[in-house]
Each structure stands twice: as structure tokens, then as C-alpha cells.
Amino acid sequence: MYPDRVGGGLPELRKELSCTRDTVASAMKKMESKRLIIGIGQGVWMLNPRMLAMGNQTQIALLMAEYDRYVSEKTGV
């Protein structure tokens, strides 16, 4: 898994965080609605590099372009 990704699905996150599946699902939806993360696959989310990114300017620019592509694909904008 890449450092800008969160993965494992809701059951794994629920177990790691010691909370209910509904709590994890609600938190992930809220973070996605605020554009902090974007779902990019089954149980995989990408962190918004504009909020937190590591690397040089080129690497960060590539992450931002990738994130924007996922947002565009998901929202049609």
C-alpha cells in the first residue's frame, strides 16, 4: 500500500480502530464529503495531497493530479 492510501476495507479498519462498522463507514463518508479522501477502489481510499503530502514538489504535483483525476472520474466534474 502506498503512504497516501488507506486500505483494508471497513471490517479491517473497524477492528483496528475498535469501533463499529457503521462508525467507520460514517467517518469515511464524512471525510469523503469534505474532500479529505476519495474512494479509489474496493476498500481503498486516497488521502487528499493538498491536506497532507510528503515528497518533493514534483511528487506532490503528481499526487495532486492523480487525486484530481479520481475526483473527476467519480463526480463527472
Image (spheres, rainbow, N blue to C red):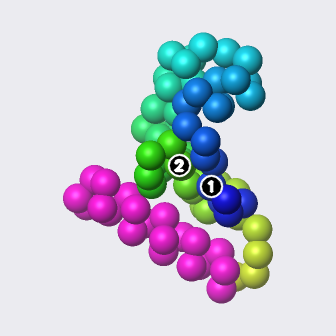
Q: Residue at x 64, y 24 (%)?
A: 14
Which amino acid type corresponds to the residue marked 2 in the rendered image?
Answer: Val
| Label 1 SS | strand
Left or right: 66, with 8 as reference point: left
The correct choice, above or below, for 22 with respect to 16 in the image is: above
Report the Cα–Cα distance between label 1 and label 2: 7 Å
Give the x, y percent position of residue 73. 30, 61
Check the image and report above or below for 65 versus 23: below
Residue 30 on the magenta span: no
Locate residue 10: give its quadrant: top right
Choose the circle earlier in sequence order: 1 or 2.
Answer: 1
What residue do we see at 67% from left, 15% from top?
19
**Which residue is the extreme one toward the left?**
76
Left-right relation of 35 to 13:
left
- Element type at mark 2: strand
Residue 75 colored in magenta in the image: yes
Whether label 1 touches label 2, CB < 8 Å: yes
- Which residue in the protein does label 1 denote? 5
Query: Which one is in front, 24 or 76?
Result: 24
Nearer to us in this view, 10 or 75: 10
Residue in the foreground of this view, choosing between 41 and 39: 41
Q: Characterize the local packing of mark 1: few (<14), some (14-19) or many (20 or more) Cα atoms within 10 angstroms.
A: some
The residue shown at (65%, 75%) is 60
Indicate the amino acid at tag 1. Answer: Arg
Question: Relative to 61, is 32 above or below?
Answer: above
Which residues, given as a range, are shown in magenta?
58-77
In the image, residue 60 sits, relative to residue 77, either above or below, namely below
Disc ID at residue 44: 2
Residue 62 appears in the rendering: yes
What residue is shown at x 70% (from left), y 23% (from top)? Answer: 15
